[in-house]
């Protein structure tokens, strides 16, 4: 299975589970306000710019679009830190982690993630785990209504929110009907000569018995929010304003920026489009 096909299949599976867009390579930064086109082969966003860049603001001014995106009321907002989020695609059954001999020695008692996942034989399934993610988003009520008319955003995809975290776990099954176990483990601080190193804290990392090629995981030892495994993607709606009883109906942000559909037709289990539709694009 080619990496581009794996990326597209994984994105497709997580979108079905969350209505959001998955990042196959979470260390690659995706920022609120990024815009561009979707690569129909890999499913990744090809970023062309960001609405919060100075060049975009200068273009808005030239186009007569009266909004100052540097205003604090227009800048991206952050939500509170959330609990761990575990997303699974259809056909994946989640269960409690059984304490088999090979995992009984691990320090899992105090960790927030410990689970097993059973995948359906003959089908691809996907799991995404985000450790204590934080959402960042474009504030509602003003920004999206005005930037919609910017020429740079014509028929483009716009990142309206992101989920960042210090640790993520991605797995896509190999169709064998496998069962995998996942957990966050903690280890004691390393002792230096004479006692505990100043400022030392327990180390946290992922443990899994999964062996498949489609496994990606990372945990920032300093707890920095440097991974972006998931984001909300909306596409500019270019339809003219609708008339309602002879009057122009006020369009909402959801009208102007609806959730985007995938730029590919239904995929088979290996991420390949149905041959009947392979030449058809949205």
Image: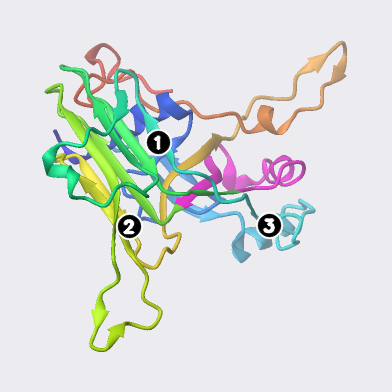
Residue depth check, mark 3 versus mark 2: number of the one nearer the observer: 2
Q: CA distance from mark 1 to mark 2?
A: 16 Å
Q: Give the residue pinned by disc 3.
A: 75
Position of residue 157 relative to residue 93, above or below, is: below
In the rendered image, the quadrant that contains the C terminus is: top left
Using the image as rendered, state which of residue 244 and residue 119 is in the foreground.
119
Q: How many marks?
A: 3
The x and y percentages for residue 265 are: 34, 19
Position of residue 79 relative to residue 201, above or below, is: above
Mark identifier at residue 51: none
Q: Local crowd at mark 3 within 10 Å, few (<14), some, or many (≥20)?
A: some
Q: Which residues are magenta?
A: 137-164
Q: In the rendered structure, which disc, 3 or 2, sits on the residue that comes first in sequence?
A: 3
Q: Residue at x 48, y 42 (%)?
A: 231
Mark 1: which secondary structure? Answer: strand
Q: CA distance from mark 3 to mark 1?
A: 29 Å
The answer to which image quadrant residue 266 occupies is top left
Using the image as rendered, state which of residue 187 and residue 181 is in the foreground.
187
Position of residue 47 relative to residue 8, above or below, is: below
Q: Are marks 1 and 2 in contact (CB under 8 Å)?
A: no
Q: Give the residue pinned by disc 1.
A: 86
The x and y percentages for residue 5 are: 22, 33
The x and y percentages for residue 171 are: 25, 37
Mark identifier at residue 219: 2
Q: Local crowd at mark 1 within 10 Å, few (<14), some, or many (≥20)?
A: some
Residue depth check, mark 3 versus mark 1: number of the one nearer the observer: 1
Would residue 148 be counted in the magenta stretch? yes
Q: In the rendered structure, which disc, 3 or 1, sits on the residue that comes first in sequence?
A: 3
């Amino acid at each position: 299975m080619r990496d581009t096909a794996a990326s597209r299949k994984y994105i497709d599976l997580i979108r079905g589970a969350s209505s959001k867009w998955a990042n196959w390579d979470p260390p690659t930064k995706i920022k609120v306000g990024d815009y561009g086109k979707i690569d129909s082969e890999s499913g990744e966003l090809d970023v062309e710019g960001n609405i919060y860049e100075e060049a975009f603001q200068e273009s808005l001014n030239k186009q007569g679009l009266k909004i100052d995106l540097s205003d604090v009321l227009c800048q991206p907002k952050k939500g509170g830190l959330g609990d761990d989020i575990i997303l699974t695609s259809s056909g994946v059954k989640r269960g409690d982690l059984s304490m088999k001999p090979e995992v009984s020695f691990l320090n899992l008692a105090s960790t927030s993630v410990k689970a097993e996942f059973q995948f359906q034989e003959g089908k691809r399934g996907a799991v995404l785990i985000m450790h204590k993610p934080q959402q960042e988003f474009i504030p509602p009520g003003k920004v999206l209504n005005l930037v919609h008319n910017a020429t740079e955003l014509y028929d483009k995809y716009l990142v309206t929110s992101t989920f960042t975290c210090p640790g993520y776990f991605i797995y896509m099954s190999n169709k064998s009907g496998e069962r995998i176990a996942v957990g966050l483990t903690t280890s004691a601080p390393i002792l230096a000569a004479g006692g505990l190193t100043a400022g030392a804290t327990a180390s946290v990392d992922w443990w899994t018995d999964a062996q498949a090629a489609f496994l990606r995981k990372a945990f920032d030892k300093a707890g920095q929010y440097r991974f972006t495994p998931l984001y909300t993607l909306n596409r500019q709606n270019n339809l003219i304003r609708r008339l309602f009883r002879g009057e122009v109906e006020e369009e909402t942000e959801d009208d102007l920026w609806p959730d985007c559909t995938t730029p590919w037709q239904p995929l088979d289990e290996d991420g390949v489009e149905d041959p009947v539709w392979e030449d058809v694009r949205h």
